[in-house]
Amino acid sequence: QASPKHDPPAACSLRQSSCKLFFPEDPVKIIRAKGQYMYDENGNQYLDCINNVAHVGHCHPEVVKAAHQQNLLLNTNSRYLHDNLVDYAQRLSKTLPEKLCTFYFLNSGSEANDLALRLAQQYTKHKDVIVIDHAYHGHLTSLIDISPYKFRNLDGQKEWVHVAPLPDTYRGLYRENHKDPATAYADEVKKIIDKAHQESRKFAALFVESLPSVAGQIIPPSGYFQKVAEHIHTAGGVFIADEIQVGFGRVGKHFWAFQLQGEDFIPDIVTMGKPIGNGHPVACVATTKEIAEAFSATGVEYFNTFGGNPVSCAIGLTVLDIIEKEQLQAHALHVGNFFMELLEQQKAKHPLIGDIRGVGLFIGVDLVQDQEKRSPASKEAEFIITRLKEEFIMLSTDGPGRNVLKFKPPLCFNTKDAELVVDKLDMILRGK
């Protein structure tokens, strides 16, 4: 394979002024993709370890066919009856607990989270929200306000937003040696609620990513969601599970990441986006009949011009078909376990690797300068993803220290791909 060729500096500068690129100093111009591979203008093939949007694989022929066939017949707004809309809601309902029986279709994860916030505030008649530190829930103004990852760089924290500690058992307040980190982290949420009540504040929701991603591929301790849900319900609020980055079988063991907490945990609202349409703009909010009725009772109808259009629903249905037909949920579990085993072997060899955490094909490799202090190895992480790009592997970093290598590939990513990534990672860590 030839060395990647890139656009002139002027073109790169123009693009950077309007959007954020991977590898901004030396961006890649991708012109086509298939499965877990992307191709640049020179025909170089890159292994995609980072794209959790092309969920069933880039340009999956069945998804492309579904979009084309429906486009030949009809695509319009959702003011009309259409079987695709009803069929899609029914199919999604079969993947969720029975009480989550009302669906709103939208076009992006940000739209979904914005609506979830509105639903919660209307249902409870309260405004205050608890979020997790370093969370990111979307780019709309309402969501920047509840995303510490963003608002700390802008106007700061609004008085109605309350930030709970990230339930990180590797470098958080309560770590792996704590006897009950789930309760300890949940108690921090209870403290926030108690303090707010003393100030006569009332809560609408606890808004949580089922697996915090931007915060560094975090796996909350088992039982944490049940405990914090009890606290927020007692306070009069609802629990919102943001599944936008991690839903649709990625975690392998379950279809939804919130289900990792146990069968006894059911959110009041679930939001979906990114992988739901395999690259087509689709999103969804699932909630209870009671919350939906309270929202409708305002008399202000909710209408989304493109949400739930026939083409989007045809694509969504096809994505569900492919996940089932190609057994991608089981595949994610098998390949993810295999990948984690290989990465653990690297951890034993390289002191730069402090922690390997993940489930299914949601994996984080936490790089540290010192195993005892666990200081983030941010520069080393940046160097590694740059070197991997030179080896035609696409990866990125996340976490407060930008030191966590994040793996969220398309679900068709296989064991040979995992072996290639680990071989290249080992080579780079050995200084070659």
Image: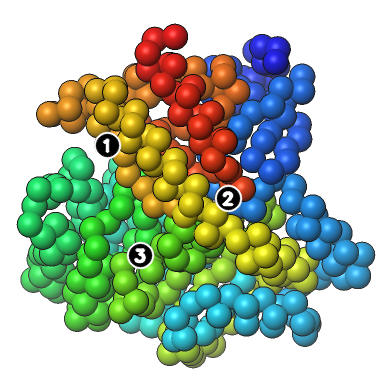
Disc 3 residue type (three-letter): Leu
Q: Is residue 281 left or right of residue 288?
A: right
Measured along the vertical axis of the image, is residue 427 above or below residue 45?
Answer: above
Whole-Å distance between the Cαs marked 3 and 2? Answer: 18 Å
274 relative to 213 in the view: left or right: right
User: Percent x, y for residue 316?
Assistant: 68, 66
Mark 3 highlights which residue?
Answer: 260
Q: Secondary structure at mark 1?
A: strand
Query: What colour scheme was applied to this rendering of the protein?
Result: rainbow
What's the residue at 57%, 43% (across, down)? 414
Residue wearing tag 1 = 355
Dot 2 corresponds to which residue?
411
Q: Earlier in the sequence, mark 3 or mark 2?
A: 3
Residue 236 appearing in the image: yes
> Could you tell me if the residues under marks 1 and 2 are in contact, i.e. CB atoms within 8 Å?
no
Q: Is residue 104 left or right of residue 335?
A: right
Q: Nearer the viewer, residue 346 or 191?
A: 346
Q: CA distance from mark 3 to mark 1?
A: 20 Å
